[in-house]
Image: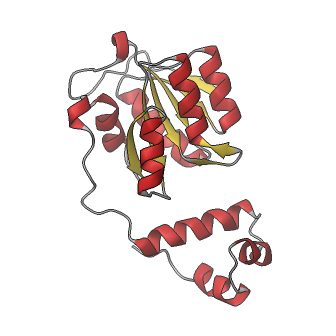
Amino acid sequence: MTERRDPDAQAQDGPSHAPAGDMSLLIVDDDKPFLTRLARAMEARGFLVATAESVEEGMAAIAGRPPAFAVIDMRLMDGNGLDVIAELKVRRPDARAIILTGYGNIMTAVTAVKLGAFDYLAKPADADEIHAALLALNHDRAEIPDNPMSADRVRWEHIQRIYELCGRNVSETARRLNMHRRTLQRILAKRAPR
C-alpha cells in the first residue's frame, strides 16, 4: 500500500461532495499501470490518494484510515473487491465508493450497490468518468456510457484475465475455461475486439 500526496494539486471542475470535506481516496486495483495512472490523475484533481493492489492491502488501508472515497476493482488477484466495499461501509458508512469492472453484469451491479457502492463503472473507465462519479450527487449517478464494451470484448477481457492468472499457460487456461486448447490459441492470437 502506498500513500501519495500532492500539496499543490487543486480540485478541478465542480463542487466537492466529499464527506465532511475529507478528500482522502483509496484506489484498489491489481493492474499496476492503471493504478499508477489513476492515482496521478486523482491527485491532480485534489485527492489525497492511497493505493493498494489486493483485497488484503485494501482491508489494511481501511483498518488504518478509512477513506472518504474509494475506487475498487471488482476482480483482484486475491479475491473480490466487494469484500473491500463491505469493510469500508462498516468502518466509514459515509464513504463514497465506486466499483470498477470489466466483467459487468446486472447481478454484480446490484450486489455492489447493496453492499454500499455509490456507483458502478465498466472498465475501461477514464479519470474524468471516475471523478464525476465520485463527486456526483445521489440523483446524478454516472450515466450509461455512450460506447459500452461489446459482449465480444467482455469475453475477450475475461479470457485474457484467466490467461494471466494461469501464468500464460495455454493448456491450464483452456482447462479452466472448459475450452479446446486450439480454440483458445486462435482467440489469443487475435486482436482485442472493440
> Which residue occupies 47% across, 30% down?
70
**Considering depth in this image, is 31 or 105 the residue closer to the camera?**
105
Task: Relative to 20, say whether 176 is above or below.
Answer: below
Quadrant in the rendering for residue 163: bottom right
> Which residue occupies 68% across, 24% down?
60
Quadrant in the rendering for residue 61: top right
Image location (x, y in percent) of residue 26: 52, 28
Colour scheme shown = secondary structure
Q: Residue furthest bottom?
A: 182
- The image quadrant where one finds the C terminus is bottom left
Image location (x, y in percent) of residue 149: 38, 65
- The image quadrant where one finds the N terminus is top right
How many dots with numbers?
0
Whether residue 76 is visible to the viewer of this picture, yes or no, is yes
> Which residue occupies 58% across, 23% down?
3
Task: Relative to 165, say whether 98 is above or below.
Answer: above
Q: Report the side of 181 relative to 134 (left or right).
A: right
Quadrant in the rendering for residue 170: bottom right
Image location (x, y in percent) of residue 86: 55, 30
Image location (x, y in percent) of residue 127: 37, 42
Whether residue 1 is visible to the viewer of this picture, yes or no, is no
Q: Report the side of 175 relative to 106 (left or right).
A: right
